[in-house]
Image (cartoon, helix red, strand yellow):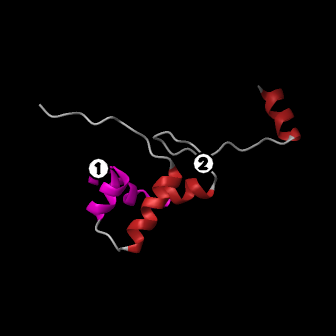
Amino acid sequence: MSLKRKQMSIDPKTKQLILVEVEKGTLPKTKIAEKFGIPKSTLSTIIKNKDKIDEAVELGSTNSTKRLRKPLIKLNKLNKKMYLSVK
């Protein structure tokens, strides 16, 4: 019987650090995965989703959740009045 790994989420900034390490190319991907304590398949997924991760960090996503969500847009007073009147 194999042991189950504890599910964990990695914040977008850490994922970006992982991507920087991969782009340097000084270490093999297996060693990078060991360094950050993640499975090789997770590293592959992070590399595959590079564009989404970069966009999330650029937009200021601070979610530490599994899903990358774009931050909510703040409503100015006029838009807020329109939103509340339609609601």
Q: Position of residue 39 (x, y in %)?
A: 29, 50
User: At 43% from the left edge and 60% from the top edge, which residue is drawn?
Assistant: 18
User: At 86% from the left edge and 33% from the top edge, which residue is drawn?
Assistant: 81
Left or right placement of residue 34 versus residue 70 in this view? left
Q: Amino acid at mark 1?
A: Pro
Quarter-of-image position of residue 75: top right
The front one of 23 and 69 is 23
The segment highlighted magenta reads: 29-51
Q: Position of residue 57 (x, y in %)?
A: 58, 55
Q: Which residue is mark 1?
A: 39
Q: Is residue 32 magenta?
A: yes
User: At 37% from the left edge and 59% from the top edge, which residue is drawn?
Assistant: 48
Q: Is residue 60 magenta?
A: no
Quarter-of-image position of residue 29: bottom left
Residue 61, disc: 2
| Main secondary structure type of the part rendered in magenta | helix
SS for tag 1?
A: loop
Q: Position of residue 38 (x, y in %)?
A: 33, 49
User: At 52% from the left edge and 41% from the top edge, which residue is drawn?
Assistant: 64
Query: In the rendered image of this protein, does residue 16 appear above or below residue 63?
Result: below
The front one of 50 and 24 is 24
